[in-house]
Amino acid sequence: MKFNKLILSGLCLTLPMLFASGNALAQRVTLKLAHNLDQSHVVHKALEQMAKEVQEKSGGELKIRIYPSGQMGGPRETIELIQNDALDMTKASASEMEAFVKEFSVFSCPYLFDNEDHFKKVLFGPIGKEITDKTTKSGFNVLASYVAGTRSFYAKKEIHSPADMKGLKIRVVSTPTTNKLIELLGGAPAPIPFGEVYTALQQGVIDGAENNIPSYNQTRHVEVAKYYIEDQHTSVPDYLIISAKTWNKLDDKQKAILTEAAHNSETYQQKLWDEEVARSTEEAKKAGAKFITVDKAPFREALKPLYDDFNKDPALAEIIKQIQAVNK
């Protein structure tokens, strides 16, 4: 009898400890974050800084494991993995998000922003939030927005006006907007995977592509396409997204820590970006790149029909109107 009482007494002492231990273990969460960027890219560096901050501020209860360089596929694949509960977080550009939320297509609207300040006011302001809030219906939330400069064409031949683009095969992130953009300039859009662009340029499968200066330099596309045409047709941001189901599983403390770290990563990424643009420009020039400054007016004129397409959709037309009003 005494023996049984001792056992029961021991259990009463042990079980709360086991439950407490179990709860402590349950609070430890490791989030998987996959993206298609090289580890030298400023967004990857910003994500690393965010992961470090999250781990430190949570006392190790919340960790982020990063899988870079397309280990889990491109942005389309990683977004689908998020929707299928096989991944927690990823990075995607506005062009890649367009397939899930049509409002992101406005960032592919050419010459929509007057300058970098105008772009940032929209991206980090009420309009940007209005757009990113719409992702919840697609099963994910936006945690951070990242600048990605302006996108310009680069090619194996000089381009000074839309007339020089006639018949050229240009690689794009394929969306209805980007495809029509190339067609209006007289070219042919080529939806080639990002990792195959170097070889495609080298072998003459395509004549050019379009991207920002750091990407042009870091991918070594400068080696096979010497001419960078500074037409600066679009400003397409990147986003850090998290599965809505993953987000809902986090407790309030974890959400607060992750939200703050993601916000801090935005500021850090902008600093790194400005430094990278300057460095990449110099490196590209040393590698033999020729930067061509063009008159943007003929490009703007040729691309005006895209605005007619946007205006057919009342929701998109309203967002563009709001964006244009920000700087007035």
Image: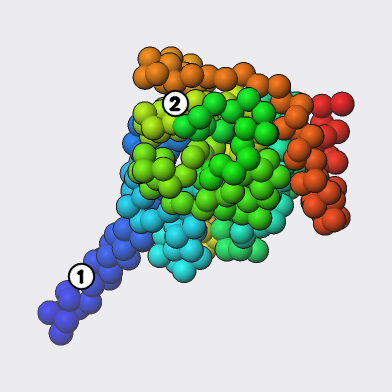
The image quadrant that residue 27 belongs to is bottom left
Q: Foreground residue, 269 or 244?
A: 269
* In this rendering, the label closer to the viewer, 2 or 1: 2
Q: Earlier in the sequence, mark 2 or mark 1?
A: 1
Name the image quarter holding residue 204.
Answer: top left
Give percent across and percent down for residue 262.
Answer: 51, 39
Above or below: residue 43 compared with residue 243: above
The amino acid pointed to by label 1 is Gly
Q: Which residue is mark 1?
A: 10
The answer to whether residue 319 is left or right of residue 67 is right
Query: Image point 44% across, 63% down: which residue?
Result: 81
The residue carrying mark 2 is 226
Counting every numbered tag in the picture gives 2
Q: Which label was assigned to residue 43?
A: none
Q: Nearer the viewer, residue 273 or 309?
A: 309
At label 1, counting other C-alpha atoms closer than 10 Å, the crowd grade (few under 14, some 14-19, many 20 or more) is few
Q: Quadrant of the N terminus?
A: bottom left
Q: Quadrant of the C terminus?
A: top right
- Which residue occupies 63% across, 25% down? 160
At 85% from the left and 41% from the top, the residue drawn is 321
Q: Is the residue marked by circle 2 packed among few (<14), some (14-19), or many (20+) residues within 10 Å?
A: many
x, y percentage for residue 100?
62, 60
Q: Amino acid at mark 2?
A: Lys
Q: Work out whether residue 206 or residue 261 is closer to the camera in this orientation and state it.
A: 206
